[in-house]
Image (tube, rainbow, N blue to C red):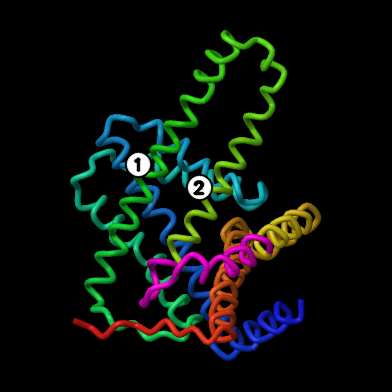
Amino acid sequence: MNSFIGIARDAFDRFTEDDGWAIASHVALSALTSLFPFLIFMTALAGFLGTGNLATEATSIIFDVWPEAVARPIAKEIEAVVGTAGGGLLTVGAGLALYFSTNGIEALRVALNRAYGLREMRSWWLTRIESVAFVFIAAVSLLALGLLVVLAPIIWDAAVGFFPWIAPYASLVTTARLALATALTVLTLIVLHLKLPCGKRTLSDIWPGIVVTVLLSLAYALGFAWYLRGAAQTYVKTYAGLSSVMIALVFLYAISATFIYGGEFNAASLRMRKRDVPCPPQA
């Protein structure tokens, strides 16, 4: 217990020394501005594959883990933007959307390198190509999950036909959907901590910070949702038409801070174990 408190305190001290609050605002803004290009690219990819309706399901998976008061207005705006986006994949617009959607990943890379106390040694074009690959893989994975969500009711109906006794458990489908979104979030965190910063880490190196990030994010999401039930109108009066954007930014800012703190927590744990993870020299 004492070691955990020591690591948590060391992580917070380093978080403030590394300008974690300022970096969190950069990550939050980059994430919000990258979200629309990413979903536009995913919609274009779905159209290219002839499965345009999967983009809607994939988008809903992203927002399943967001508080409803935050997700609902942003999802509405995204539906309006994506609904007017062209479906052709090999277009200039889709290519630009793919490129601009990598800005959020690059912001996360900067945050994690700083949290782990590393200096990026790879060429900028190499890391950008890697980010493009991440975006493409994420889009394909989300579309595959969207297909699973679309097929789930059909599979359930078939299962009920064979096993009628499971019919009363239909409400578990909603729980399963939330569990799927949560598992996707955890998997994303694992990939980000393993692959984005320079150097090599193992799963045992990163799992403490991932657990801390998930728990802090969950606590904040529940608290923020409770707060918005009584204060949402304050944002509307203060920011008028920009209220939904500001609510999303505040939410993403805190989530980004927990993400960076998770990296700092891992770095503090590595320091306690006297384990160094250097960046390899540039080839």
Q: Does residue 225 appear to the left or right of 109 in the view shown?
A: right
Q: Quadrant of residue 118?
A: bottom left
Which numbered marker is on residue 43?
A: 1
Q: Main secondary structure of the magenta part?
A: helix
User: Which residue is at 66% across, 36% downward?
Assistant: 175
In the rendering, which numbered label is found on residue 77? Answer: 2
Question: Looking at the image, is mark 1 or mark 2 earlier in the sequence?
Answer: 1
SS at mark 2 in the image: helix
Are the residues at dot 1 and dot 2 in contact (C-beta closer than 8 Å)? no
Magenta stretch: includes residue 212: yes
The image's mark for residue 170 is none
From the top left corner, tell me how far across and down residue 84 is, in percent. Answer: 36, 41
Q: Nearer the viewer, mark 1 or mark 2?
A: 1
Mark 2 belongs to which amino acid? Answer: Glu
Residue at 42% over, 31% down: 147
- Residue 11 position, x and y percent, is 62, 82
Residues drawn in magenta: 194-215
* Residue 206 located within the stretch drawn in magenta: yes
Q: Which element carries disc 1, helix, strand or loop? A: helix
Tell me the kind of residue under disc 1. Answer: Thr
